[in-house]
Image: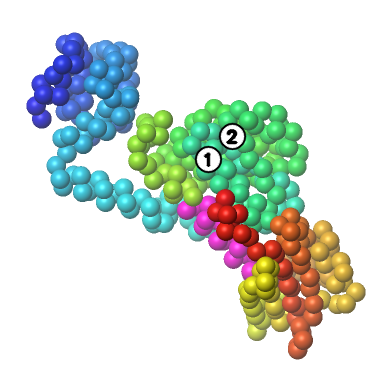
Amino acid sequence: MNIEKITQGKNLTDTEHTVLEYILDHLDTVQTEGVRGVARANYTSTSTIMRLARKMNYSGFVDMCYKLRSLVETPHQTMQEEEDFLNGFSTQSLLNYNTYTQLKICAEKLLEQRDKMIFVYGTGFSGTVATYLTQKLVNMGILCFSATGGDSVGIFENTLERMGMFFCISKSGETSMVRDKIKTAQENGVCTVAITGEQENSVGRYADLWFRVENQWKLDDQNTMPNTFFPQVMMLIELIAYEYRRLCMENGIKYSGSMGFVHTTLKTVGDTVVISVEDNGIGIPNEDMEHIFERFYRVDKNRSRAVGGTGLGLSIVSDTVRRRGGSIRAQHRQSGSGTVFIVELPLARREEADE
């Protein structure tokens, strides 16, 4: 590269010119070195490097390194970088650092703690994804609350006693507000789940469950570069939701025996969506039918102890349906043993569905 061409009219000092040459000669490593490492290597200050970036019309050190690299890369290098970037949108990238067992444990914990509150926390861009996770959990019928940045002052501390799980998202894993909250949650006996970049970090060390997601731009604190970290976190959230749904279905099947089935149908009747869930299990006695949607009510306590369960599942479903303006009822199957649950929900208008 002709360095004189890109520095023409920039009025660089000799030191700034030397630093620029160093960066161009070490483009593969300067982002790992960071601004302090480059300053040390050139016996200068970080302010000199930031001044160089401004003179070169870049927003900062990371932006300068990224754009200078694009000027000197060969077409082959550019294609390889593009391939690596696109591969970051696959579930395989997630499985490079996490296991199916972790997903299952997380879903099981959500089931165990569903009578308590789930608290989700993140700051900055991570706060946006934390809001997505919160909405997902709420739509699944889980009592959930989220806070971002300084909005959590007082709210977090006042809900600790009712908190069953604490989720936090931090790309760096070193954000002080996130670290302090997960540490406090763990010290208070709350199950903690951290989603961070793949590198070792302090937030991950305080987590009972630690999900690691590849962070392609570790020094990009302002999130100016294209990065698959946040899309992968959202994929991870969907995987957890899928596993949670699967466990809920298992909960229905385990009461039906080895030849059991669970049939689900969906249809629209006028302005109403009707969902029917039918099984051929042992059924529900008449005297219990009017109580099954009550919190902690279990039809057969001895059987519940044998196969597990807290008596909260149907109560949560009922509350979720009612909050959405619907209704739920249960009845015996017309032929053979088993139960049919019928949910009716108002059909959302298109403008409401798009919100």
Q: Position of 194 compared to 217: left or right?
A: right
Q: Residue 71's spot in the image, x, y percent?
A: 17, 34
How many numbered discs? 2
> Is the C-beta separation of discs 2 and 1 under 8 Å?
yes
Q: Residue at x 74, y 73 (%)?
A: 341
User: Is residue 242 covered in magenta?
Assistant: yes
Q: Residue at x 73, y 48 (%)?
A: 116
Query: Residue beneath label 2, please?
Result: 148
Going from the N terminus, do you reach mark 2 or mark 1 first?
Answer: 1
Q: Residue 239's spot in the image, x, y percent?
A: 51, 57
Corner quadrant of residue 335: bottom right
| Mark linked to residue 1 | none
Corner quadrant of residue 152: top right
Q: Residue at x 61, y 47 (%)?
A: 134
C-alpha gap between disc 2 and disc 1: 8 Å
Corner quadrant of residue 241: bottom right
Residue type of the residue flagged with mark 1: Thr
Q: Which residues are magenta?
A: 235-253
Q: Secondary structure at mark 1?
A: helix
Label 1: few (<14), some (14–19) or many (≥20) C-alpha neighbours in 10 Å? some
User: Is residue 129 covered in magenta?
Assistant: no
Residue type of the residue flagged with mark 2: Thr
Query: Residue beneath label 1, please?
Result: 128
Quarter of the N terminus within the rendering: top left
Position of residue 62 relative to residue 265, above or below, is above
Q: Position of 298 compared to 191: left or right?
A: right
Along the viewing direction, whichever of 292 and 209 lies nearer the viewer: 292
Q: Outermost residue, right direction?
A: 287
